[in-house]
Amino acid sequence: MGVLPIVLKGFVLCVSTIWALQERRFSTVFNAVNSGVTSLVTALTSCFSSVHHQTRGIVIFV
């Protein structure tokens, strides 16, 4: 086996490892943002529901 195939195999391994780490990082960021948005929507829904319940029958002019 020559030197070039060994170097090429090492290069391919290095690139595939870097690619996998980038995919993992993207997945982690996506999951964090998804969790944050879900929490925000839940909190806003609860807040608006509470405000709507407390102001029922009162006309609010904006």
Image (tube, grey):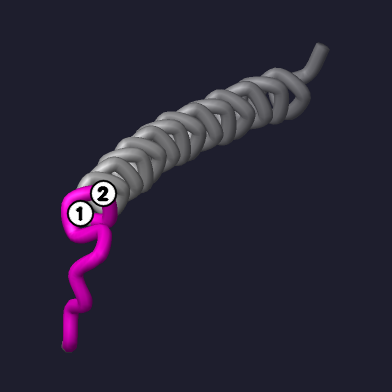
Name the spot of residue 48 as percent of width and height, x first: 28, 54
Q: Are marks 2 and 1 in contact (CB under 8 Å)?
A: yes
Q: Residue furthest right?
A: 1
Closest to the camera, between mark 2 and mark 1, is 2
Q: Is residue 53 above or below residue 21?
A: below
**Residue placed at 19% from the left, 59% from the top?**
55
Say which quadrant the C terminus sits in. bottom left
Dominant SS of magenta comes to loop
What kind of element bears circle 1?
helix
Type of the residue with mark 2: His
Name the spot of residue 42 as percent of width and height, x first: 35, 39
Tag of residue 53: 2
- Asked whether 8 falls inside the magenta stretch, the response is no
Marks 2 and 1 sit apart, C-alpha to C-alpha, by 5 Å
Name the spot of residue 17 as percent of width and height, x first: 55, 24
Q: Quadrant of residue 20?
A: top right
Q: Is residue 50 above or below residue 28?
A: below
**Residue placed at 71% from the left, 22% from the top?**
9
Q: Which residue is mark 1?
A: 51
Say which quadrant the N terminus sits in. top right
The magenta region covers: 52-61
**Are there few (<14), some (14-19), or many (20+) residues within 10 Å of tag 2?**
few
Name the spot of residue 23 as percent of width and height, x first: 55, 34
**Residue placed at 44% from the left, 32% from the top?**
31
**Are there few (<14), some (14-19), or many (20+) residues within 10 Å of tag 1?**
few
Closer-to-camera residue (55/4): 55
Closer-to-camera residue (9/5): 9
Type of the residue with mark 1: Val
